[in-house]
Image (spheres, rainbow, N blue to C red):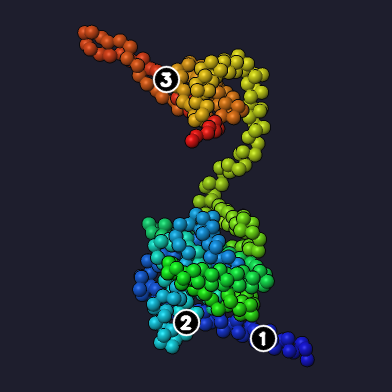
Amino acid sequence: MPDKKIDTQLESAAKSAELEIKDATLIFTDVWADLESEYGYENLRFPKEIILLGGAPGSGKGTNTGLILKARGLTCPPIVVSDLLDTPEMKQLKDGGNMVGDREVVAIVFRKLIEDQFRDGAVLDGFPRTHVQVECMKLLVAKIDQLHREFKETPMARNFRRPTVHVVVLFVDEKSSVDRQLHRGREIEKYNAEVEASGVGEKQELRVTDLDPARAQHRYRVFKESTWDALQSLKEIFFYHLINAQGTFAEVEQNILNELKYQSSLELEPETFEKVRGISLASEIVIHARQELVKRLDSYALDHSDLFDRVIDLINVRFMPIIKRHAISGRAIVNSEDEILSDSLALTMLIDVFSERGFHVVIDKQLNRVPERVDLKTGEIAFRPNTVYRIRIYFAGSEIRRG
């Protein structure tokens, strides 16, 4: 008997999931048809990157949205789904006694994503929340992929890039969530009381759940039983980041930065990545930079002793007096016509010696023509070539007290 009961429950769950998927397909097909009719097929241009931001009540979505945008190099505002549902259009729908269901939410979110300001990327705060919305999101990404393939070999390819989707879930346990909700309620109550007393400022929205421990607890459990499960189902499809948001602000910030750092192999087009991957990463080059510098300097002293001595003499006699006069600014410029610098190995030695001593050097080679004589009969001017090396030397300047 127990086995039959379990089988019945599993069968019921499977049927429910199947109905949700069918429902999502109908909703998506309907919404997509509306968008295509309104904007035109070639104008259905969605963000290159979509970040689906979710989290328990009090997990700090609003607090950390700015950091998430910065971590991904986005300057557009976040798309806060709860704000979209407070638009006049949605209020009119609700005032008419209609429910704001998955179809309405999906339609308003997709329409927002088409806006030009989100072309490079968008953070969706509070979407998806249900399994139907999850399925619609999957269908949208599949459709964007299809557009990408269709327009790949056309002049419009740049408008239909392969999408990158990140699911970012900020997690806190039930106690932390309830404590934070109630703390937020107390702070808003205090602020609103000050606004009312002074008449300065605007009152903030105060949720009923932020005042009642039982309701705050219920809100957290609703999240765990519905939205959490929906977000978890995206694990196998999109880049999934479960971020511990229980620590201090600095700890949570570092957790977010670690999770969302750039990964070229995942974000570039495969063809683009294949072209650039042969160039060494800066992080790889600098690992052994110190050891390589030591080897070069020792080889100069052993294998090119005379030239090395001449370069060091040039630095001491010609460069260091000028550098010392610029000790406060941390920047000196030296122009030199010394013929030793025409030797490329000598130039390399110069750079390496300065690097070993803690300076950063940039060298420009300027080819000039210097008037040498004039033919009095023809008036023709004869020039001789002249090479000037402009050496910029940077270092940590001196701190001086002002005031």
Asked whether the residues under the numbered discs 3 and 2 touch, taking CB atoms below 8 Å apart as contact, a structural biologist would say: no
The x and y percentages for residue 86 are 44, 76
Q: Which mark is residue 57?
A: none
Quadrant including the N terminus: bottom right
Question: Is 228 placed above or below 165 here?
Answer: below
Label count reads 3
**338 or 60, which is in the foreground?**
60
Q: Residue at x 53, y 15 (%)?
A: 317
Q: Residues within 10 Å of mark 1 (few under 14, many from 20)?
A: few
Mark 1–mark 3 Cα distance, whole angstroms, equals 85 Å
Q: Amino acid at mark 3?
A: Thr
Q: Residues within 10 Å of mark 3 (few under 14, many from 20)?
A: some
Mark 1–mark 2 Cα distance, whole angstroms, equals 30 Å
Q: Which residue appears farthest toward the top when viewing the image?
A: 376
Q: Amino acid at mark 2?
A: Val
Q: Which mark is residue 100?
A: 2
Q: Earlier in the sequence, mark 1 or mark 3?
A: 1
**322 or 41, which is in the foreground?**
322
Which residue is labeled 1 in the image? 11
In terms of image quadrants, where is residue 302?
Answer: top right
State whether residue 17 appears in this view.
yes
Q: Amino acid at mark 1?
A: Glu
The x and y percentages for residue 75 are 45, 57
Which residue is labeled 3 in the image? 387
**208 or 397, which is in the foreground?**
208
Label 3's element? Answer: strand
